[in-house]
Image: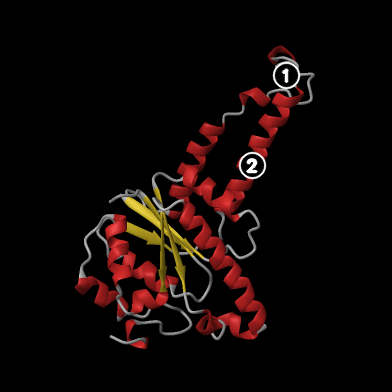
Amino acid sequence: MNFQTVLIITYGRSGSTLLQGILNSIDDLTIMGENNNFLYDIYSAYNHLEKSVKIGKRIAKNKQLTDNYQHPWFGYSKIDLELFLNDAYLLVKRTIAPPNVKYWGFKEIRYLNIQDLEAYLDFLAKLLPSPCFIFNTRDLAQVKKSGWWAKKDDKEVIQRLTLLEEDFHKYAQKRPRRCYEITYEDVCNKTKKLKELFDFIGVEYEPEKINKALSTEHSSSNNITFHNLKK
């Protein structure tokens, strides 16, 4: 594979669980489900540590002063951000990935309220080894009719998700080597984009496995399958 970790980045009711199932048909790759975006808190913790180092450097007159236990930022120079990243990755992998997995990743839908999305995704790229970001979207006219979105104002749903999709696209365009954009419709209709996704990841496209995944229910609340769209 071209990547060690694979993330499906999306929003709710986009058909991402179906894509998750398809990617899990790839040998040696395991894509876990959602984790309530707990990695954002790790990102926040890293930011606090990084800020502590910057503040300490700014106010320190010399190393001897900040190594004095009477200094308010005593010990800031001992903060090892690389060590934090290494330990944080081990924590993440041991917490949500199966043991002895070769390649792994997860899908997550909780990006709508993240104000610093670009910085957060850059952090994930720093935290996770050789990551691939797959941005999965869907026709918003269909999304707003599905699940909890149907209970919200149609105009607001379309507006907010459109802005999020724009952020996804901007990020992917800036970092094409690790980002791939695909739609639910591409997946269900087995368009060229689906095959190219496998090429991008660096694995063989196996039609029989794809068809099996597409004909299997991949949602707890409704049947999102290949048969919903044209063959």
**Residue occupying the point 40% across, 51% down:** 178
Work out whether 64 lies above or below 39: above
| Neighbourhood count class around disc 1 (C-alpha, 10 Å): few under 14, some 14–19, many 20 upward | many
Task: Give SS at disc 1.
Answer: helix
The one nearer the camera, 58 or 82, is 58
Task: Give SS at disc 2.
Answer: helix
**Residue occupying the point 66% across, 57% down:** 115
Do the CB atoms of the residues marked 2 and 1 lie less than 8 Å apart? no
Residue 207 image position (x, y, % from top left): 21, 72
Q: Identify which amino acid the numbered label 1 is placed on.
A: Thr
Residue 208 image position (x, y, % from top left): 20, 74
Colour approach in the figure = secondary structure
| Horizontal side of residue 191 vs 121, given as left or right | left
Which circle's residue, 2 or 1, is located before the other in the chain?
2
Q: Can residue 35 be seen in this view?
A: no
The one nearer the camera, 102 or 119, is 119
Query: Which residue has dot 2 on it?
Result: 47
Query: How many marks do you count on the picture?
Result: 2
Query: Which residue has dot 1 on it?
Result: 66
| Horizontal side of residue 6 vs 43, given as left or right | left
Q: Is residue 120 visible?
A: yes
| Horizontal side of residue 4 vs 169, given as left or right | left
Where residue 198 is drawn, which disc sits there? none
Q: Identify which amino acid the numbered label 2 is placed on.
A: Asn
| Neighbourhood count class around disc 2 (C-alpha, 10 Å): few under 14, some 14–19, many 20 upward | some
Work out whether 75 lies above or below 211: above
Residue 196 image position (x, y, % from top left): 29, 64
**Residue occupying the point 52% across, 80% down:** 143
**Residue occupying the point 72% across, 19% down:** 66
The one nearer the camera, 86 or 98, is 86
Residue 140 image position (x, y, % from top left): 53, 79
Work out whether 50 lies above or below 17: above
